Amino acid sequence: MPDGEAPKNFRSGFVSLVGRPNVGKSSIINALLREKVAAVSNHPQTTRNAVRCILTTGEHQIVLVDTPGIHRPRHALGEFMMEEATGAMESVDALCFVVEAGRALDGEEESLLKSLDGHKIPIILVINKIDRLRDAEDFWRKLGPIQERVKPAAVVPVSALKGTNLDVLTQEMARLLPEGEPIYPPDVLMDTTERFLAAEIIREKIFEVTEQEVPHSVAVIVQEFKNPEEYPELKRAEIRADIIVERPGQKGILIGADGSMIKTVGTASRIEMEGRFGYPIYLELWVKVKPGWRKSRLETERAGYRHR
Ligand SMILES: Nc1nc2c(ncn2[C@@H]2O[C@H](COP(=O)(O)OP(=O)(O)OP(=O)(O)O)[C@@H](O)[C@H]2O)c(=O)[nH]1
Ligand SMILES: [Mg+2]
């Protein structure tokens, strides 16, 4: 849209990506945008908030809503995540139901589909990770019952990792959108603040270097965010963040021997932030213990997970 005017027949609208944790919803969004915007990791339940990411071309603008993976919540944080996911399924033009290639639907996926019974929203069945498939016959055998259950408007096998078939997915999504003006300016990639992004980047780096329950017990609270645009006297942004964990042992793991772990997290976070925000950054991280914060509604809200 070089002249700022949307062409005739321009389509725009909202598409939420939903599915089990770890199926690759955030990875698909990053691959569609050809830009790393959403946090990704090999641990389930990486995404905690519904986040709007925006794909604009000359013909359409698709507001892709990334959502937390559907699971049975075991604490206040999990409840918040499920509210985010179910909220993102309302008032959208289409849903991408993302599953992993070669796997049958599990109980959580079944109950998600049950909750969609009677909904009028068209569903695209997205089968991700086809690069991992060994047995094509097995794939088709498993697909039949899933298709029967989902009754999709389209079925699109993709690989977010290899970039396979993403153009087809984009076309199928665009086809389901109404004609209309773009919702966001064409250069906007995400509808979030830099403060939120900073916390997400730090959390993702922690997910990369820690294991088992440690990543899930972590929240990142950005206490101070001063950037050179708002504070011209600063030559670089100054970001101070608290990393909340649930137990002293987790604090020890996260700090590491002689502070080596927290240094790795800090350096990787700073480098990614500098690339994405476009200015040099001074980053300070503090690890704090708040026993059982995920179980307390008040503490999850304090950690930034505010119920809408
Ligand atoms: N082999 C392969 N791995 C993939 C593909 N897409 C994603 N992954 C991997 O799958 C894992 C989970 O990816 P995410 O994008 O974080 O999954 P998600 O569905 O957003 O997960 P939650 O946010 O926890 O619900 C990561 O380790 C990705 O690298 C793919 O197409 N092929
Ligand atoms: Mg995710």
Image (cartoon, rainbow, N blue to C red):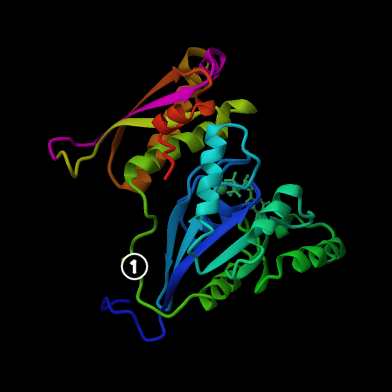
Q: Position of residue 65 (x, y in %)?
A: 49, 57
Which residue occupies 51% across, 17% down? Answer: 291
Q: Is residue 210 left or right of residue 182?
A: right
Which residue occupies 44% across, 39% down? Answer: 201
Q: Position of residue 22 (x, y in %)?
A: 64, 46
Which residue occupies 51% across, 60% down? Answer: 90
Determine which residue is flagged by label 1: 186
Disc 1, SS = loop
Q: Quadrant of the C terminus?
A: top left
Q: Quadrant of the N terminus?
A: bottom left
In the depicted structure, whether residue 204 falls above or below residue 83: above
Range shown magenta: 232-253
Give the tally of numbered discs: 1
Q: Position of residue 208 (x, y in %)?
A: 56, 35
Q: Amino acid at mark 1?
A: Pro
Q: Residues within 10 Å of mark 1 (few under 14, many from 20)?
A: some
